[in-house]
Structure formats: C-alpha cells, structure tokens
Amino acid sequence: MKKITSYFVAVLALVLVAGSVQAQNDFSLAEQLYSRVAINPAGTGNNANVNIFSLNRFQYAGMTGEGAPFTTLLNVHTYFEKAKSGLGFSFSYDNSGVAYTQMKATVSYAYHLNFGKGNLFSFGLGLGYANKLFDPTRHVLEDDSERSDLGWGEEIEQGHYFDANFGIEYSNKYFLAGVSVTHIPGYFIKDPTTLNYLPNYYAYLRGYIPCGEKFKLSPAVMYYYTGNLPKTSSSEEMKNTLTASGAHVVDASLTGFIGKYFWVGLGYRTETTTYAMFGVEWNWLRVGYACDLNLGKLNNISWTSHEVMLSFSIPTKQQKEWDDE
C-alpha cells in the first residue's frame, strides 16, 4: 500500500460563521484533502487505488438546542489506466445553521499525464447538482416582529442549480500543488442572493520532507477566496450595512508522520483559529480526528468543532504498476 504521506495534505479552513444572514458557499475541512475531489476535480484518481472517503464535522459542539452546524462528506474515486483518466463521485450535506442547509452531488473526471518517477500532472472537470434551502420558520425570535426587519417571511425558499468545477494539479514524491475554481455557473448570475452559489477559488501547496527513516514532515499552505454574496434585507438601509464581501483565508499547517501508521499536526488560519489533528492508518483503513482550539479572540467560547474521518484505500494491480514506474 502506498505510504500515507502520498495521500495526506494537512489543510483546514474554518467553516464560515453559522446562523448568520449569509449562507456559506463552500465549506473547507481538515481532512477533506485526503480526497480532494470535492474542491478540485483534478485530484480525481490521483492514485490507482479505489478510494472511499467519508467525513463528519460537528461544529460548536456543546451548543444547547437545535441548529448546531453539521457537515457530512462522501468521496469515491479511482483511476483507469487504459483511459489515463480518473473518475469519481462526491456528495455533501451541510447544515450551516438553524435555517440554512445545502446539498451537492458531483461527478468528476480528470485526465492524467504521468511522466514517470512519481511526476503527475492532471486537470479535471466536475459536473453536478447543487441545492440551497432557507427555512425561516426554524428561527425562534424573542420578538417575532423582527422577522420583517430581517426580511424573513414564513415561506421556505429553495434554489436548485446546475454546478461545475474545474482545476489542475501537479504532484511528485516531494511536492504537490493545485488550483481550482468551484461553482463556475455563478459567473453568469447578475443579481445574486443568498440562495445562489458564486465562484470560490483555491490554491494549495504541500511539501514532503523525509527526516530519517521513521519520521517525515509535511508543511502545507492553502489560500481560498469565497465570492461576494450579498445579504438580504427588507430595508434599503440594512442592505447597505449587511452586504458581505468575499473572504480571503490563508491556512498554514505542519504535520509529522511517525513511522508508517501515525500522524499528528497543528495549523493556523487567518480567521484566528488554531487547530490540531491526528490519525492512524492500518492496511486499507485510515481514521483521523481534528478539532479547533479556541485561542485568541475565541478563548472565551467553550464550544469547539470536531471532525471524524474514515477512509479506505483499496489496492489494485494497476496501483502497483504505477508505483513501479
């Protein structure tokens, strides 16, 4: 089985603040880049194993009542040698607050140029379906008259969309780099609302540094930008004050791999959140855990976020041939 370091990119970005008037576009997770299909289709079939990846994130754990954000993600993908292509499927469901939910299902394809000795260049396209739902009746307000000020009625609002993503990626034994854009149809939306998806942009780098036979280091950095998505309000004054600009986020991390079976890492993102992660691999199975550490401006908040990752990388004959090249 290929070493765990060829799968792992230690990157985490904070889920956008839940329960706010603005619904988030994409979510970014600590362990999702074990399988990058969800944000960069060029990662589809990045090795010839059959890869099955699942992740659940519980945000603001310990929050009482309903509405704590929850995210689940499933990626499945593999490589086909004769076509020099990867094919995969990604599904996600995100409850980003009391009233907001979104669901995405995408089929991804990547074409690979294998230059041998671990040098791989790929570009990919993902096509699928996306859905956003806002149910204002799930919000319980102290003063129900505030609904009109917030622009919330009693009707459930929902949007159904065709979705498309594109990305490129290069990797070798010691280095990985990729760029991608998600929700490409959002370019053509003239008057976006919180029920629309606007393009999100990603760029990431990861290094792999052997430090003796039993220890490796993997520094990583990721930048992403979420498109401008205006907040809605019934009054023109509130529209002016609640319009949200896109978020620029930089995430840096350092992960150490101990032997062939364990990893532990720390990271920091520009939204003043520090996080920790660790995991174990045994044969085809990989189990990981990550949590946010509430420091700085967040040190007075007792709630935190937890991620649990479970994935399988089932070896195939063509993977052995790939490794031998």
Image (spheres, rainbow, N blue to C red):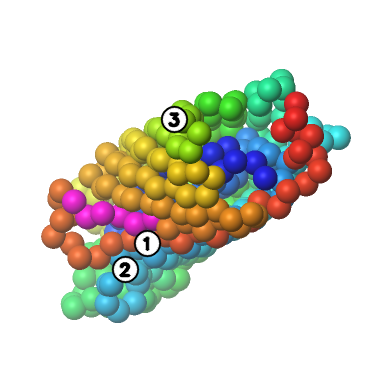
Instruction: Check if mark 1's residue and mark 2's residue have beta carbons within 8 Å.
Output: yes
Q: CA distance from mark 1 to mark 2?
A: 7 Å
Q: What is the quadrant of residue 148 in the picture?
A: bottom left
Residue that carries the numbered disc 1 in the rendered image: 306
The residue lying furthest to the top in this view is 115
Which percent across, then down, holds residue 235?
Answer: 24, 56
Kindly identify which residue carries mark 2: 61
For the residue labelled by badge 3, is the local secondary structure a helix, a strand or a loop?
loop
Residue 58 lies in the magenta stretch: no
Apparent side of residue 318 relative to residue 256 in the rendered image (left or right): right
The residue at the point 44 percent across, 47 percent down is: 263
> What element does badge 2 sit on?
strand
**Quarter of the image that includes the C terminus:** top right
| Distance Cα–Cα, label 2 vs label 3 | 37 Å
Query: Residue 247 versus residue 118: which sits nearer the camera?
Result: 118
Is 293 covered by the magenta stretch? yes
Rendered residue at 42%/34% (across/down): 217
**Which of pointers 2 and 3 lies earlier in the amino acid sequence?**
2
For badge 1, the amino acid type reads His
Name which residue type carries label 2: Ala
What residue range appears in magenta? 290-295
User: Residue 211, labelled with which disc?
Assistant: 3
